[in-house]
Image (spheres, rainbow, N blue to C red):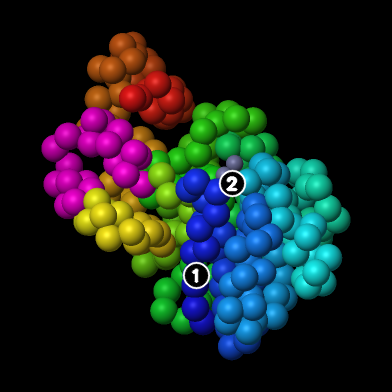
Amino acid sequence: MKLMALPAFSDNYLWLWQQDQLAVVVDPGDAQPVLKALSDHGLTLQAILVTHHHPDHVGGVRELHDITGAEVYGPAREDLPSPFTPVMHGDQLDLLGQTVDVLDVPGHTAGHVAFVLPNAPKSPVLFCGDTLFSGGCGRIFEGTPAQMLASMDCLATLPAETQVCSAHEYTLSNLRFACAVEPHNTALQAYSAHCQQLRAEGKPTLPAKLGTELQINPFLRARHPDVRHAVARHAGLSANEQNDDVAVFAALREWKNNFK
Ligand SMILES: [Zn+2]
Ligand SMILES: [Zn+2]
């Protein structure tokens, strides 16, 4: 099994998962990079997985489906521009010989789903769209902070060695914010240096390791005293609000929204 991050637009990755001469693509916002990869590597597309309805994730779905006949699986609670098989939390697919678990992770959009390959050969693989990024999380467009926090909690229960395949290369700007929240986090400093090196070499910072994210990503660490205190100080939270996990998470997300 092989994972490829196909760059698209300014900072998207279209994840192509390959087994022998078969492939599955996740969130093909553009068909062209996928068609090129299929032809370059002599692959047949078996399935298209969609995490949420935003155009940069679904823009190439219809063309890829029409050309390859690959089956499309997408979030049951969202509308997509082409026909698809709806999936929701607890559903299990069998693709390219792998079990694929579906998780509901609302917040960025109301019906956002994630796909997990728990038995992938080296370590589990997570395709999380715009819910979890390395060092950050998606903006809350349709859901609530409580939903996004619950989605973070859900993803945090996956094994530490899980490979996190996010849909955007936002890592360095996320880490600048993370360092503002936790300036004394040494794991975060080491990881930032590592990612800066990767980007300087023109390499993706993804997949990230979930275990690393739990040490450095403020949105997975919103209950950590250091994060909680930094948010309380920045947002001027009352003592009651400081003890409210959702209020802290909402203020953390708001801080990031306005962070330059
Ligand atoms: Zn999105
Ligand atoms: Zn996106």
- The chief SS type of the magenta part is helix
Q: Residue at coordinates 35% horizontally, 35% vertically from top-left? A: 222
Circle 1: element type: strand
What type is the residue that disc 2 sits on? Val
Q: Assign the C terminus to one quadrant of the image.
A: top left
Q: Taking the image as four quarters, which one is ligand 1 found in?
A: top right
- Residue 80 vs residue 238, the one in the foreground: 80
* In-image side of 93 versus 260 (left or right): right
Q: Name the residue beneath numbered marker 1.
A: 4
Rendered position, 144 above or below 88: above
Which region of the structure is painted magenta? Answer: 171-193
Residue 153 at least partly seen: no
Q: Secondary structure at mark 2?
A: loop
Residue 244 x/y as whole percent: 41, 24
- In front: 4, or 99? 4
Residue 151 in sight here = yes
Q: Is residue 169 magenta?
A: no
Which label belongs to residue 105? 2
The residue shown at (51%, 33%) is 139
Q: Position of residue 196 (x, y in %)?
A: 24, 51
Looking at the rendered image, the disc whose residue lies closer to the viewer, 2 or 1, is: 1
Report which quarter residue 135 is drawn in.
top left
